Image (tube, grey):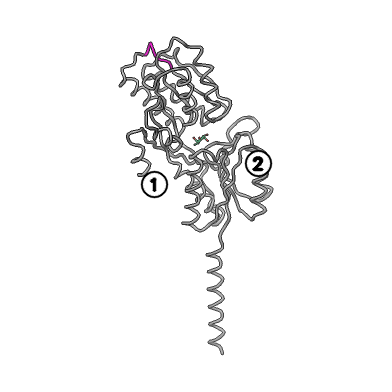
Amino acid sequence: MKKIVKMWTLASVMAASMGAAFATDKLGYLVKQPEEPWFQTEWAFADKAGKDLGFEVQKIAVPDGEKTLNAIDTLAANGAKGFVICTPDPKLGPAIMAKAKALGLKVVAVDDQFVNAKGQPMTEVPLVMMAATKIGERQGHELWKEMTKRGWKPAETGVLAITANELDTARRRTDGSMSALKAAGFPAKQIYTTPTKSNDIPGALDAANSMLVQHPEVKNWLVIGMNDNTVLGGIRATEGQGFKAENVIGIGINGVDAVNELSKSKATGFYGSLLPSPDVHGYKSIQMLHEWVAKGKEPQKFTEVTDAVLITRDNFKVELKKKGL
Ligand code: FCA
């Protein structure tokens, strides 16, 4: 009799511990622009982390503030314990944090940092992002290199810098790019900045058009922007105004958003893109959240993902494959 009791006890212990191992946490992954391959890649690798580490990822598109706050309610109603987010607007930070706190959800920010009511970065929220200034400097450096290779005279060249300064990561990238060009010897007075109203191709195209018409004297253009779509908008504008591919050099940032362009049968002014690590952003941010939720291990406040590779028409397939993208 005693033996049987013991066996039962063992069985129930085993069942309980198996239950714990299989109880999957639900975690959200909210992104501002699901149409960008950048964010699709983050989602894919967040899913991979979920499969590897045993949690479920609820992926929700949050193009505006209302959708963001609704998504947080939905997550809580579904029993999620936290979420990773690339916010559609950094200024939503305080509202996002207040709602998450009220519903008992943990938050990790990815790519775009929250700002508080005073416009200062909310450094208390864990953040995973790319090294913005560094990648911008690389953009400027690579543009200078390609322009030198083509033998362009600085006097005949203009820089079309499409900016989005209200987004800190964007401002740091384009500032980095412009300072690298100046440091290399590009004349500062021929760098023309134009702000885009939206972070997509149509917005950047409008911004670029209004600047291009003001400078009919420029023969060759270098195009700067915070990501691939911004630079692509600039390239489309140069095409619309009759510039040939050989008189334009644009280098984007994100890489994965440049695949269609680099696959075109004929070269365009879009020379290449800096490919960082959307795979690492997606996997790591949600892994950190999972460890926080499941094991109480609080993430470090700032995780910077460095290193980017320049992909062009010549090497993009190989480089993307190397990263499993
Ligand atoms: C911002 C941009 C995205 C991507 C990300 C890392 O959110 O809008 O395209 O570059 O930073």
Q: Residue at x 47, y 48 (%)?
A: 45
Q: State the SS at label 1.
A: loop
Choose top left, top right, bottom left or bottom right for residue 24. Answer: bottom right
Where residue 192 appears, as percent x and y from the top left, is 48, 16
Where residue 277 appears, as percent x and y from the top left, is 43, 41
Label 1 neighbour load within 10 Å: few <14, some 14-19, many 20+: few
Q: CA distance from mark 1 to mark 2?
A: 32 Å
Where residue 71 appears, as percent x and y from the top left, is 64, 46
Q: Residue at x 48, y 11 (%)?
A: 215
The answer to whether 67 is drawn above or below residue 175 in the figure is below
Q: Is residue 165 left or right of residue 187?
A: right
Q: Quadrant of the N terminus?
A: bottom right
Q: Which residue is mark 2?
A: 67
What span is in magenta?
154-158
Q: Which residue is mark 1?
A: 324
Choose top left, top right, bottom left or bottom right for residue 198. Answer: top right
